[in-house]
Amino acid sequence: MSVENQGVKAVNAGMTYGKNIEKARRKAGLSQTALSVSLGKTPATISNWESDKFEPSSASDWVKISEITGASLDELILGVDPRDRREPFELQPFEQSIINLVRVLRLDPNDVILAITQLAAKHSPQGEMAAVHDADRGPRPGEPSRRKK
């Protein structure tokens, strides 16, 4: 990005990098002075960014602004919240059934994801080979023997 930029437009119509920075700063409840101190910049620098006289010239400045204000880089650079960009999708019937089962049984979704991942790995060609390899290697420490006596 160039140091001198005459109001480069962000993706969000009508918003510029400067306006996005100002919006994030205000949303965080910070003054230009408070942001400048946190960034190690002068208040004039923040003012120049917000009035689109120039923009932050390093990636680290953008990251620091994001960390200080709590705004995502998408919000600062593109002018949009990434949560607003999610495209709706349609669940397959079996996916909806799994979600309903998790809700009804009050299961921990992380446990369900882990179980599905393990099941998928077990039934994949690589998973079958790993299972054979594990059987050849013997039990892990603290694990009972799997060999038939």
Image: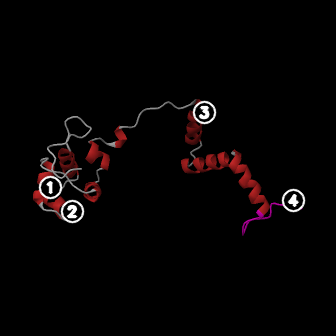
Q: Are marks 2 and 3 in contact (CB under 8 Å)?
A: no
CA gap between label 2 and label 3 equals 50 Å
Q: Which mark is residue 39?
A: 2
Q: Which mark is residue 148?
A: 4
The outermost residue toward the left is 44
Q: Residue at x 74, y 54 (%)?
A: 131
CA gap between label 3 and label 1 equals 52 Å
Q: Is residue 112 magenta?
A: no
The outermost residue toward the right is 149
Q: Which mark is residue 46?
A: 1
Q: Is residue 122 visible?
A: no
Crowd rating for badge 1 (residues with CA inside 10 Å; few <14, some 14–19, many 20+): many
Question: Residue 71's spot in the image, x, y percent?
Answer: 28, 50
Q: Earlier in the sequence, mark 4 or mark 2?
A: 2
Depth check, mark 1 against mark 4: the one in front is 1
Q: Earlier in the sequence, mark 1 or mark 2?
A: 2
